[in-house]
Image (cartoon, rainbow, N blue to C red):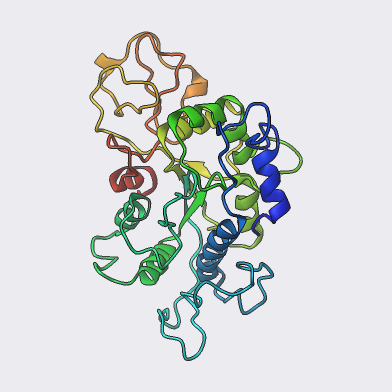
Amino acid sequence: MPLDLHQYTDLWKNPTPAGFDQGGAHPIFPGHTPLPAHNDYVIRENQLEDYLDIFRGFDTRAAGRGVPPIIPAVWYYPHPFFPPPGVAGFVPPPGVPNPTIRYILIAEAANPAPTYFYNVDHLHRSPYFTAPKDAFNFPAGYIPAGIPKPQVLWLLAQQGVLLLDLYPFAIGYTPLIRRALNNREVSAHFWGTPGPVLAPETIGARINALMGMGLLDPEGVKLAFMAPPILSHFLAHQINLGALPNFGTTIRMGVNATIPPVLPAPGHVIPGPLPPTFLVGPPPHASLVGLGGVVRPLGGLNSIPYYACTCYDGAGNPNSLFIQNALLP
């Protein structure tokens, strides 16, 4: 269920960690950055709900989804997977059983540019769309070249793929802003901190809701990070330490082999697994081992968690090979 205008605005204005403190004494985004339009956010959430209808097996728009798509309440386009009678569009083949969610990719936020993953009208290439598409073109040729975007999304759903954004605000996030969100525990809040009740904006609440609807694969869900390394490493480290929960998923690491086996710059991942000659000092502490991968701290930097956990490459884009390394057998 999308956040209403009141909830959305509060998350923008509330002090950290449960908000971005915009309008407060120490805003995450300095200056007078305007609140991104709530209508645009609601449209994105409804486009995600359209995609989730593939897993549900029915059109929740027709069933009274109960969330006005925009103001005034008109749909942005016909349902891309359950087109109404007489409306041209992609029609799923009959008799195909409903898929279940097997893989969750965590991204940072929607881009301010019109490149949203679930918007079938956004057709130009974006690495956040092409990397998962290419990763789950498995076996090769499963997703034919040149097919319409609704059909690509339907095929991704058959593989059990779901992408979720951590933050609701479509703003240009910089390394400085990402570090501020981490240091002021905003990233942890939007992931979902341990407690009796998870706030509705958190990844944990969303995963729990999907579980309650019976959309998660009963054999287990693998989760990987497709956000930039500064955010991915922070969340992986906190989960590894037990400070943040995994919400019943198996956190998986993508191996980035594009960075040479030398001391990396902060925020980068290291290749893995590294030869023993590149390990300096004692083995890593038990709290830094897990998540379905291997943590390889380097000499002199043992206090900094360098993980091969992100699906980003050296060019600063999501990478299909690293998604495959993280999630596929």
Residue 88 rendering spot, x and y as whole percentages: 41, 85
Work out whether 268 lies above or below 190.
above
**Horizontally, is 33 left or right of 142 in the view?**
right
**Horizontally, is 62 left or right of 161 in the view?**
right
Looking at the rendered image, the quarter that the N terminus falls into is: bottom right
The residue nearer to you, when weighing 221 against 317, is 317
The residue nearer to you, when weighing 246 against 192, is 192
Residue 241 at least partly seen: yes
**Horizontally, is 22 left or right of 277 in the view?**
right
What residue lies at 57% left-to-right and 40% top-to-bottom?
Answer: 246
Residue 183 rendering spot, x and y as whole percentages: 57, 24
What residue lies at 40% left-to-right and 61% top-to-bottom?
Answer: 159
Residue 200 at least partly seen: no
What residue lies at 60% left-to-right and 28% top-to-bottom?
Answer: 242
Q: Quadrant of residue 117?
A: bottom left
Residue 28 rendering spot, x and y as whole percentages: 58, 32
